[in-house]
Amino acid sequence: MSFQTQIDLQTQSHHHIDYASKVLLLGSCFAENIADKFSYFKFQQLQNPFGILFHVSGIETLLTNAINGEQYDEKDIFFHNEQWHCFDAHSKLSNPSKEQLLTSLNDNLMSTRQYLETASHVIITLGTAWVYRFIETDTHVANCHKIPQKKFLKELMLVDELRNALQAIVSLIKSVNSKTSILFTVSPVRHIKDGFVENNRSKAHLLTAIHDIVEPRENVHYFPSYEIMMDELRDYRFYESDMLHPNSTAISHIWEKFQKVWISKDSAKTMLEVDTVQKGMLHRPFNSKSEAHQQFLQKLEVKKEQLQSLFPNILF
């Protein structure tokens, strides 16, 4: 008897991710959860150069500016709560120095463009269809930076609006890299601050819009992170204490599903070797000067060298 429903997943027949691949990950905090897995296993990856971006409008703005070679200047930033901020970026880029913020924004735009030109895969995780429009400029913002809410209008993007934005994102990416695989997914994080009904409406809009533009023949795909969380892991024991964010067990489960579909079998073997090295590096001996521990360290160095000789991009 089975006590769990299973999402039916089909392994990709081509365009697998391996250690020669370059993966760009954009979107919500769940995108960073998956990016951390890529980082742990030493794949080539770039994650959220403008920080966490929860909605499609913020991601479209980032890609538009990066691909078109735009530059931020003083008119694009503002001072609030003793720091300089940009509405297009997450607060992790905010800085007490105006010059340093502008440098970070423009450097990250350039690195996004450069990485995108050679990326084998672009993974975009959408968190919500709710957006905030800054009344003063009549534009959507990626982050409100704790500006009073009365200065914004909260809007639910319609399916047609989302579809158009997603198509624009695909076109932008393909304009500089026609061969890259684009993979959309919906974050399983529940945005309950919007309201329970409102969160479900938001996810429904995202899912409908994404499936309207997914076209495997054009190398645009969908991975069901949201469905795996909702249907395979239907239990609060798979959530953090806030009961909103997937915990490490859930993230690992979704990662394992992703690995089976998207990561090459040859790379899976290398991942096991990388995992052995990573765990070895975290090992804390009782006696660091013992002969046994010194032999352990020597064997660990040999494993590192063997991996790096095969994959020069792997750095421990």
Image: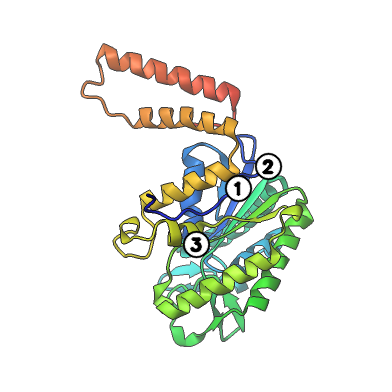
Asked whether the viewer can see residue 260, the reply is yes
Three-letter amino acid code of the residue under disc 3: Ser
Residue placed under numbered mark 3 in the picture: 187
Q: Whole-Å distance between the Cαs marked 3 and 1? A: 20 Å
* Quadrant in the picture for residue 22: top right
Relative to 13, residue 209 above or below? below
Residue placed under numbered mark 1 in the picture: 10
Q: Secondary structure at mark 1?
A: loop
Specify few, some or many for label 2: CA neighbours under 10 Å numbering under 14, 14-19, or 20 or more: few
Along the line of sight, the residue nearer the viewer: 66 or 277: 277
Q: What residue do we see at 58% from left, 68% from top? A: 207
Q: What residue do we see at 60% from left, 48% from top? A: 10
- Please provide percent x and percent y for residue 171: 75, 62
Three-letter amino acid code of the residue under disc 2: Ser
Specify few, some or many for label 1: CA neighbours under 10 Å numbering under 14, 14-19, or 20 or more: few
Relative to 277, residue 124 above or below? below
Q: What residue do we see at 29% from left, 61% from top? A: 241
Residue placed under numbered mark 2 in the picture: 13
